[in-house]
Image (cartoon, rainbow, N blue to C red):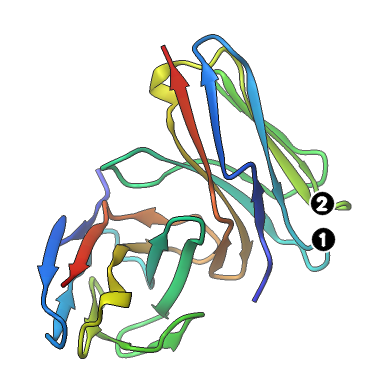
């Protein structure tokens, strides 16, 4: 069974902390994505990657960075967490032109 | 940024009711339209991918239609059950990217 695994289901962090959200897929997909989901706003794309060491900004990259050192792993980094970054974060992977496979999400609370 | 809109934002129905909701998108440069179901505490699950104008897809009691000329897709659920309670997302596909709508949150009361 193919999988996208996000390392944490729930996280609570303090304002100003550096936060790492990890995502691993076992399907050898080239494309990986990070979204956040907020009530009434749907899924908004933060960053995506088409290949190892490649990254592209999505619609809302401010306050975030990413790392893709290996094909299977795509990390989202909050350099200095703020309360506005409290959200549900979803990772996804895909092959070209085929739909996404999602992780189960990480609910991050910044206090 | 592509504008993909879903309506209604939320919907409460009784068990056994049939229901439908809408996804609207720009009709120019259409590539593919995806529907996902997202249950609480689970990963979003792919329901349908539609690419051709007039496409109709069915999976059990759930079906979807696509009109690419006017830029909309309908999702229908026949005889809603409590286990259908979820957020239903549509997404417009272009190349490797999906642009999601805001979702319709469906709650089915027993």
The circle drawn on residue A34 is none
Pointer 1 chain = B
In the rendering, at what x and y percent does residue A5 appear? 20, 57
- Residue B40 is situated, as x and y percent measured from the top left of the image, at 31, 40
Q: In this view of the protein, can residue A8 be seen by the observer? A: no
Number of other residues with Cα within 10 Å of mark 2, as a class: few under 14, some 14 to 19, many 20 or more: many
Q: Residue at x 55, y 55 (%)?
A: B102
Which residue is the extreme one toward the right?
A: B69
Q: Which mark is residue B68?
A: 2
**Element under disc 1:** loop
Q: Is residue A7 left or right of residue A85?
A: left
Alpha carbon separation for disc pair 2 and 1: 6 Å
Percent position of residue B73, x then y? 72, 43
Which quadrant: the N terminus of chain A?
Answer: top left
Pick the front one: A73 or B67? B67
Label 1 environment density (alpha carbons within 10 Å; few <14, some 14–19, many ≥20): few
Residue at disc 2, secondary structure:
loop
Please state which of residues B80 and A84 is positioned toward the viewer in this rendering. Answer: A84
Q: Mark 2 lies on which chain?
A: B
Residue pictured at 28% horizontal, 42% vertical: B42
Q: Is residue A55 above or below residue A71?
A: below
Which of B72/A14 is in front? A14
Q: In this view, does B49 lie to the left or right of A84?
A: right
Split into 4 quadrants, where in the image is the C terminus of chain A?
bottom left
Q: Which of marks 2 and 1 is nearer the N terminus?
A: 1
Task: Tell whether B50 sits left or right of A30.
Answer: right
Residue indicated by mark 1: B27
Q: Are marks 2 and 1 in contact (CB under 8 Å)?
A: yes
Give residue B7's position: percent from left, percent from top: 66, 44
Seen from the viewer's position, the closer of residues B36 and A79 is A79
């Amino acid at each position: 069974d193919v999988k996208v695994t996000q390392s944490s289901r729930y996280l609570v962090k303090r304002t100003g902390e550096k936060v790492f959200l990890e995502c691993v897929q076992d399907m050898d997909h080239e494309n990986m994505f990070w979204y956040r989901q907020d009530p009434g706003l749907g899924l908004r794309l933060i960053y995506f990657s088409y290949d190892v060491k490649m990254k592209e900004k999505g619609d809302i990259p401010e306050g975030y960075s990413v790392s893709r050192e290996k094909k299977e792993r795509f990390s989202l980094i909050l350099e200095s967490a703020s309360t506005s970054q409290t959200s549900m974060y979803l990772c996804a992977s895909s092959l070209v032109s085929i739909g996404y496979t999602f992780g189960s999400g990480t609910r991050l609370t910044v206090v | 940024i592509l504008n993909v809109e879903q309506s209604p934002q939320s919907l409460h129905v009784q068990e056994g009711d049939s229901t439908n909701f809408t996804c609207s998108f720009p009709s120019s440069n259409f590539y593919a339209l995806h529907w996902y179901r997202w249950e609480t505490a689970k990963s979003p699950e792919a329901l349908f991918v539609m690419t051709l104008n007039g496409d109709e897809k069915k999976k059990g009691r759930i079906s979807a239609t696509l009109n690419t000329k006017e830029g909309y897709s309908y999702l229908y659920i026949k005889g809603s059950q409590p286990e259908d309670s979820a957020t239903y997302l549509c997404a417009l596909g272009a190349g490797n990217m999906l642009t999601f709508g805001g979702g319709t949150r469906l709650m089915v009361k027993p």
